[in-house]
Image (cartoon, rainbow, N blue to C red):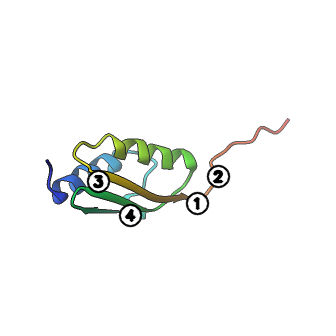
Amino acid sequence: MKTDVELKADLMEKLDAIPSVNGANIEVFVDNGMVTLNGHVDTHQTRFQVERTARRVAGMRGLQINIKPTHGGVRKSHR
């Protein structure tokens, strides 16, 4: 099993690889394998990308996501 430091580093590396994510807006906390993400992103789609990416990191015992989108991220069609 990964240490908390290894888990945090792995997760932060994967989040940094998402072009639409500003790592300065997301805090990553790890305690005994339990991961908590706090912060905000631009859209619901980006929040989904963060969650999907985080769930793919091996070695977590649990994941809590407290990330809010600052914009709706839904495009409306005007006809």
Q: Nearer the viewer, mark 4 or mark 3?
A: 3
What amino acid type should be assigned to the residue bearing mark 2? Gly
For disc 1, the marked residue is: 70
Residue occupying the point 35% across, 60% down: 36
Residue 1 location in percent, x, y?
14, 47
Q: Mark 1 or 4 closer to N-term?
A: 4
Label 3 to label 2, Cα distance in Å? 25 Å
Q: Nearer the viewer, mark 2 or mark 4?
A: 2
Label 2 to label 1, Cα distance in Å? 7 Å
Residue occupying the point 62% across, 56% down: 71
Is 3 left or right of 13, judged from the image as shown?
A: left
- Secondary element at tag 3: helix
Residue occupying the point 17% across, 59% down: 5
Q: Quadrant of the C terminus?
A: top right
What amino acid type should be assigned to the residue bearing mark 3? Met
For disc 2, the marked residue is: 72
